[in-house]
Amino acid sequence: MVIIVATILSFLIYFTPNSRTSLLDRSPTAANFGSVFGEPISPEQYYAAEREGRIYFRRNYGEWPQTEERMKDVRVFAQQRLLLIAELDRFHITATPEAAARYTKLFFGVNPNDNVPAEKILDELVKLAREGNVSLDDFDRFARHQAGQDYLVALVGMNGQLITPQEAEVFYRRENAPMETELVAFSATNYFASITPTEKDIEDFYTKRQADYRVPDRIQINYIEFTISNYLARVEKQLGTNLNEHVDEAYLQAGPAAFKDESGVQLGVEAAKAKIRKQLLNYSALSEASKEASSFLNALSQGHDDDHPYTPGDLAVLAKARHLTVRTSNPFDLKTGPKDLTIPPKNLRVLFSLRDDDPDDKERSMLYAPSPLPGEGVIYVAGLQKRIPSQVQPLSAVHDKVVADYRQSKALDMAKAAGSRFESALGAGLSQGKTFDTMCAAQFVRPRHLTAFSLTTASIPELPDKSEFEQLQDVAGKMHPGQCSPFIPTANGGFLLYVKAQLAVDQASMQRDLPGFVARMRERLEIAAFNAWFTRQYQLHFVAPPGDVTASGG
């Protein structure tokens, strides 16, 4: 994890010659980029905002936007960013370098008061910028605008600060009052054993759902591994005595408290320095492996043009000349990925973009990944061996799965039907003045008493699955004591929830937690007020390019 500080952010360095024009082909229109407060938006302004959008999505999703759906989101962000910039100018808000640096530390999940070596920051930032085809200027501008937005939120949303502790207490009680509940669950597993399908049932089920048994598009790739461990001895020799100096310097700059084991216990001096030494060697070895992989790709590109296109065999020819081994992966799809390579999911899209049938690619350069691909302790150079089109598997190949799917489907239908019948009977009984317990007994249903929970409870023993419990909390939050929910279908059947009583809030806990709750409540209301204001400003003062479908009104 890296931290971008003010001195690093001030560098205006571009890493690729097309970093300012790489998005030009995706402009909303050829000449009109819309306007803000009546002022036309220039291409430079729009593309700068779009690059900020790319950084935003890298921070939020852990990967750079690649799909058209993600790029549509980036364009929406860019339009909203242009309005934000105009509002910052209108309110004369300029974020200081220190504010931008503090925001950037939070961007990377690091405490703003922590210190790190500037060289490490720059190295990591350069890699990130190259990876996303953005510049340090873009990172600087993004951080300043985000920090400026915080000032604007505080200014515009100040009404949210007016909530009193007494008003906040009402919300606290609402969120933290425990509820006693009874759960009636209808699970498909209770009906599974009673289902015995005939062969005709299986054939009909398979025929109607053949798409479910289709093998997705798959590919095989040829690849060469540049394993980092093969370069450790070389880089250790290259670093020589300087390595120990770098280790000592890194330890002093970060401080002893920065080095901990997996359980969070601070490491001793020698253990910490050993950890730093290993990290420095691995980093240097990674750099060497990347250089050799890039050199290999550069050599591979020599001599190819439209009249001398690439072929899948080119990799093996050059590898043999350099005494390297070419491996061929097993077929794999985009969802599951290869078992014999440690490619991160975000790079699978690069492999699946490889092809040899693009009519515009007469050189057939798309047979090979354009740059080395990092894995776990290895750098790959990869090229396409072949694509395997999607195909439907015959019933004989998936018979057992079809039988299991049939039984699961029918059991789920039976569970949901039973839940709906109980809902109807319960509603009729409660309307006649009968109790929940009486109706459960009459319908031969045994409710499950749950541990009391509130809307802020993290979990209860009876429902270890987090998503199931959160769904239950959502249902309970809309009910009052004495009410029963409708039947709620789930992936494995469904349930009804009965709220028996709402218990009192623990007074000692409320007195302890209320100051922090008030602060969080004010922050939420402040942000809500800002969002409402910003949406209105967008509707009034932002004019999207003609025909731009990404403009949604805020």
Image (cartoon, rainbow, N blue to C red):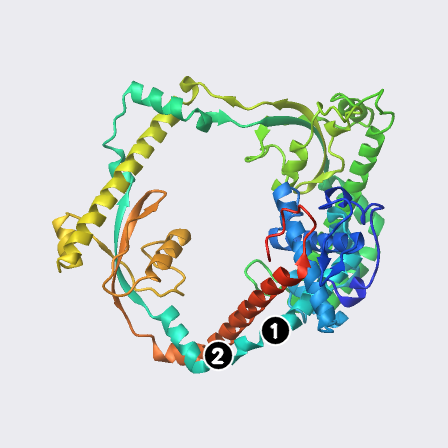
Tell me the tag on residue 508.
none
Q: Quadrant of residue 152?
A: bottom right
Figure check: 30 above or below 160 = above
Give coordinates of residue 521: x percent, y percent: 49, 73
* First-in-chain label (1 vs 2): 1
Residue at numbered disc 2: 163
Figure check: 335 above or below 266 = above
Q: Between residues 72 and 482, which one lies in front from this camera angle?
A: 72
Mark 1–mark 2 CB contact (< 8 Å): no
Q: In the shown orientation, is residue 504 left or right of residue 216?
A: left
Can I make out residue 109 in this image?
Answer: no
Name the residue type under label 1.
Answer: Val
Give coordinates of residue 539: x percent, y percent: 61, 60
Question: Dot 1: what SS?
Answer: helix
Q: Between residues 237 and 219, which one lies in front from this camera angle?
A: 219
Give coordinates of residue 458: x percent, y percent: 41, 62
Figure check: 53 above or below 90 = above
- State which quarter of the image contains the N terminus: bottom right
- State which quarter of the image contains the C terminus: bottom right
Q: In the shown orientation, is residue 416 left or right of residue 148?
A: left
Can I make out residue 277 in this image?
Answer: yes
Question: Dot 2: what SS?
Answer: loop
Residue at numbered disc 1: 156
Q: In the shown orientation, is residue 24 left or right of residue 185?
A: right
Q: CA distance from mark 1 to mark 2?
A: 15 Å
Name the residue type under label 2.
Answer: Ile
